[in-house]
Amino acid sequence: MPIPHRVQKQMIQRRLVGKEGGERIKLLRTILTELPDYKNGPYADLRKWVNEQIEESRVRKKAVHRDTLAVRREGVAQIALVGPPNAGKSSLLQALSSIQIKTGDYAFTTTRPVPSVTRIHDCRVQLVEIPGLIEGAAEDRGGGRALLGVLRGADAMVLCHAADMPLDELATIRGELEAAGIEKRAIIAVTKLDEADESRVDEVARVAGLPAIGVSVLDDASLDLLRDRLWELTGLIRVWLRGEAQALEPGATVVDAANSVHHELAESCIGARITGPSAKFEAQRVGREHVLADGDVVEILS
């Protein structure tokens, strides 16, 4: 008597974890020969699903066997979400940016980098989900070379680690990043925290030696805290100019702020009135070379 089709599908999904490209297609074809050849019913649907997986794998194989996958930069900074398959990256990106993307409880739901621009502290920041990396990615297993190429161009990264995953998964990802020579400002997002104890966050941070933050897509407060950490990762400061937020590099001056609006304003700038952390008092008049601080309100004088 055949195994119940739901159990069979779960078994197939487990067999596919870590398989990509030609290896994945070969395994899927083998699985087809093992399934009952029913024309109707649940097993017919299961055979259809396996055939769809073969077609998706063919498309993915063509996409990832290139040295680079271009992601056009947008916003003031680009932050990559990286981690193993099924680490909650897609759900996290969707929660942070309201983008509608395919999510699933099985590996390789996302097959290409997914960029999305969202507002963090009133500035446009681009988040890019990197499809799940696997062991051997630095040697191009699973098309890893192309995916790591996208990550290499990011300003910073969030290492996503599901709270119920073994820590070996995180060690594998960090090993592949090291092998590829990729070093970025980074934090760890311990995802799916609603399914685990919060002490897991401290454990992950201690073992990994990186700052870690627990997050659940069901908890708005944890998402807001993550947005704060993402802004810190950009390494930028935010000033208010003409009623709008402008993102600048640390150490930026009044004339740099003017130049962010228009080069002609920078040329005519003689100073500014500042209210905020860099001012000694409200509406302090300062010169062109006054160094700004995060949160300053700037009125350019020309």
Image: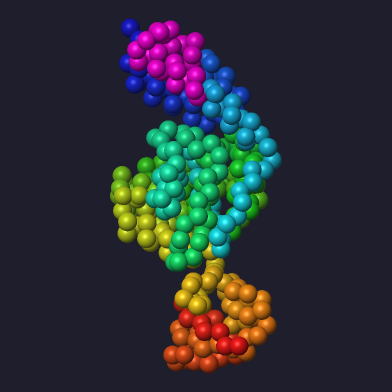
Q: The N terminus lies in which quarter of the figure?
A: top left
Lateral position of residue 12 relative to residue 151, left or right: left
Q: Whole-percent x and y of residue 258?
A: 60, 79
User: Which residue lies at the image location 61% right of the left edge and 39% below the top edge?
Assistant: 144
Lateral position of residue 262 relative to residue 114, left or right: right
Q: Whole-percent x and y of residue 239?
A: 50, 76
Q: The C terminus lies in which quarter of the figure?
A: bottom right
User: Which residue lies at the image location 41% right of the left edge and 50% below the top edge?
Assistant: 98
Toward which corner of the image does residue 205 lie, by quadrant? bottom left
Residue closest to the eye, 253 or 229: 253
Residue closest to the eye, 230 or 282: 282
Query: Is 217 contained in the magenta span?
Result: no
Does residue 51 appear anywhere in the picture?
yes
User: Which residue lies at the image location 59% right of the left edge and 34% below the top edge?
Assistant: 142
Query: Is 41 contained in the magenta span?
Result: yes
Q: Whole-percent x and y of residue 20?
A: 57, 29
Toward which corner of the image does residue 267 lie, by quadrant? bottom right
Total labels drawn: 0
User: Which residue lies at the image location 60% right of the left edge and 73% below the top edge?
Assistant: 260
Q: Whole-percent x and y of residue 40?
A: 37, 10
Residue closest to the eye, 183 or 63: 63
Rendered position, 38 above or below 287? above
Does residue 173 appear anywhere in the picture?
no
The residue range painted magenta reads 31-53
